[in-house]
Each structure stands twice: as C-alpha cells, then as structure tokens.
Amino acid sequence: MQDSLSLFSPPPPHTRYVGRFAPSPTGPLHFGSLIAALASYLDAKANKGDWLLRIEDIDQPRCVGGADELIKQCLLAHGLQWDGDVWYQSQRLSVYKAVIDALNEKQVVYGCRCTRKLIRQHGGVYPGTCRQAELPLSNNAVRLCCSGMTASFTDNILGHVTVSEPHALEDTLLQRRDGIYSYNLVVVVDDIAQGVTHIVRGSDLLDTTAAHLTLYHQLDAQIPTYAHIPVAATETGRKLSKQNHARALDITSPEHNLLRALNFLGLSAVQGSTVSDILDAAVASWQYGNVPKMQEVIVDETESTYHTGRDI
Ligand SMILES: [Zn+2]
C-alpha cells in the first residue's frame, strides 16, 4: 500500500501511457459498462500502454458480493486482460485518511454539518456556509474549497470544455458525515497513486472533472489527459444502468457484444470472427475522431445504436 508521504512527493513526469477501467461492483457488467471498458482498453493498447483494473468498492452498502468476480470474468471473456494487480479501494482507507489530513494541513478543507434539507433550500447547490466556521473534521462532512479554481480543460474527444453546472463547481464533498469517502476524492487519489496518465470514461462524469482538477492542483500532481465518450441511453437523459434494469452482458457471445460496442464507438468497419481478431483490428483502427462527439447515444431494447443522441 502506498503511504501518504510517497503520495505527496513530487510525482515523476509521465513517461508512458497508463490507463484504467474502474467499475463499481454493484452488479454484472452491461452494454454501457462494456463501452467504457473497451474504449479505455483500446486507447491504452493503441498507445502501447498499460491498462489497469480498479474495483471502486468504496461505498460498501451499494456493493454486491461476488460482483467483482463477475466483472473480471466478463472482461476476460471479451479479451480485455488488465495489466498488473487489481486494486480495491476498500483496502486503501488509511491512504484516503492521510490525504484528507494533508489537505487539512494545507487548510483547503473544512468540516461541514449542513443538512441535505438546508442545501436543498439553496437550490441544491452548496453555498459554502461552513467555510469559515472552523468546525472539526471528525463527525462532520469534509469539503474541499473549490472557489476560484479552474474548471476548463482540453478533452481529447470533445475539445475545449468548461464546466459550468453549478453543483459541479461547489465546494466538493470529500468525506460524508458517515465516514464514507467520496467518489471525487478516491478516484483522484488512486489515479495519482497508480500513475494513470490517460482517463477515458463516460460523459456522465464530465462535470466531475472540475472537482478533480482542483484536487490534482491541491495534491501537486500532474493532471492526466481526459477523453469523454458518449454514454448509452435508452432515451434522452436516461442512461443505461443497473438502476434502469440494463441487462447483464451475455458472456457466451463476446464477439457479438464487441462488434456492437465498436459500432457505438464509431468503429463499425471493424470486423473479425474471434475476440482476438476483433480486438487487434479495433486497436489498429482506434482514433478519437471516430467517436461520436455527443453526451449520449440512444440505444434500443436490443441495444442497437442510433447516433441521434443529444449533442454536447
Ligand atoms: Zn456546511
């Protein structure tokens, strides 16, 4: 396990590509998660880089026992072999605590005891009420000061992006009052610790990039390169997800699944009769320019792809 001191030593300059897929073990992979896994894999392999697998099991009450093994089985059935050991966030709690302690020493975090009701009264956007209150971090939520930070970046697929969604620009939560660390904290801490240089992920996470940029800045770490792909949706604004009863991938037909996912990613010309032929051809054809520059792409019940989704 990485200790906090090495986390905060100046990170080495990025010399080679490291990418990753980081699913939450809340159920088996579905078509939407295959797209994210495949896009990050293809980008890593097209750049002769490493592709890591990290299980984001930080929110234990939402995790489903055995889902991590189903995810691994499913990735392997689709030829998506990760490099190195699989990381589990549930094993890294002491690192997350050390990072919050270090940010506290820098005086860029604060305790917050605002209720959800109070935040709702401000239109759902946290107005920084507790910033000057000097509340202890223990037994309170912990927030990161985000005012005045940059919310603009260059995305490899979308081009110049400026996050303007008010909720994404508030003082982001790093730890909930019940002690659970936030996605925004752990994803950045682990990407730094694993030396991740390139992040390829769904556009549903686009707005979170603003908080992530602030964290990279406060942790003196090199900002990775971002590429946001469209998410699969059954209708506008309705992402294919476990909550929406997305079907688990049938791992007995990986070739079929891969070709559908490649079609979604703008690589409909890729063909092949075996998993490895398909992946080899896809790696050779992978280009950011082929990926639809959209926030979502509508798929029907059979998960056919219609590039009629909402533009960014
Ligand atoms: Zn507060």
Image: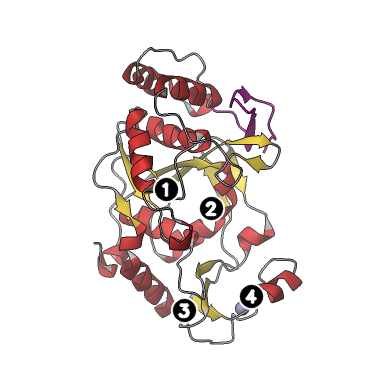
- Tell me whether the residue at label 4 lies in contact with that at label 2, contact meaning CB atoms closer than 8 angstroms: no
Dot in front, 1 or 4: 4
Identify which residue, 6 or 277, lies in the foreground. 277
Residue nearest the viewer, comparing 48 with 181: 181
Mark 1 vs ligand 1: CB under 8 Å? Answer: no
Tell me the SS state at disc 1. loop
Mark 2 residue element: helix
Do the residues bearing badges 1 and 4 touch, measured as CB atoms within 8 Å?
Answer: no
Ligand 1 within 8 A of label 4's CB? yes
Residue 256 visible, this angle: yes
Mark sitting on residue 258: none
| First along the sequence among labels 3 and 4 | 3
> Where does the image place residue 122, in percent across and percent down from the top left?
74, 71
Circle nearer the N terminus (4, 2):
4
Comes first in the chain, label 1 or label 3 = 3
N-terminal of the pair, mark 1 or mark 2, is 2
Q: Earlier in the sequence, mark 1 or mark 4?
A: 4
Residue type highlighted by circle 3 = Gln
Q: Amino acid at mark 2?
A: Thr
Ligand 1 neighbours mark 2 (CB distance < 8 Å): no
Question: What stretch of residues is rendered in magenta?
Answer: 291-312
Q: Are marks 1 and 3 in contact (CB under 8 Å)?
A: no
Q: Let me know if residue 293 is in the magenta part.
A: yes
Marks 4 and 2 sit apart, C-alpha to C-alpha, by 19 Å
Report, in whole angstroms, how far the alpha carbon at label 1 lies from the one at label 4.
28 Å
Q: Which mark is residue 209?
A: 2
Q: Which residue type carries mark 4?
A: Gly
On residue 224, the disc is 1
**Residue 107 shows which numbered tag?**
3
Q: Report if residue 101 lies within the magenta region.
A: no
Crowd tier of the residue under label 4, counting other residues whose Cα lies within 10 Å: few below 14, some 14–19, many 20 or above: some
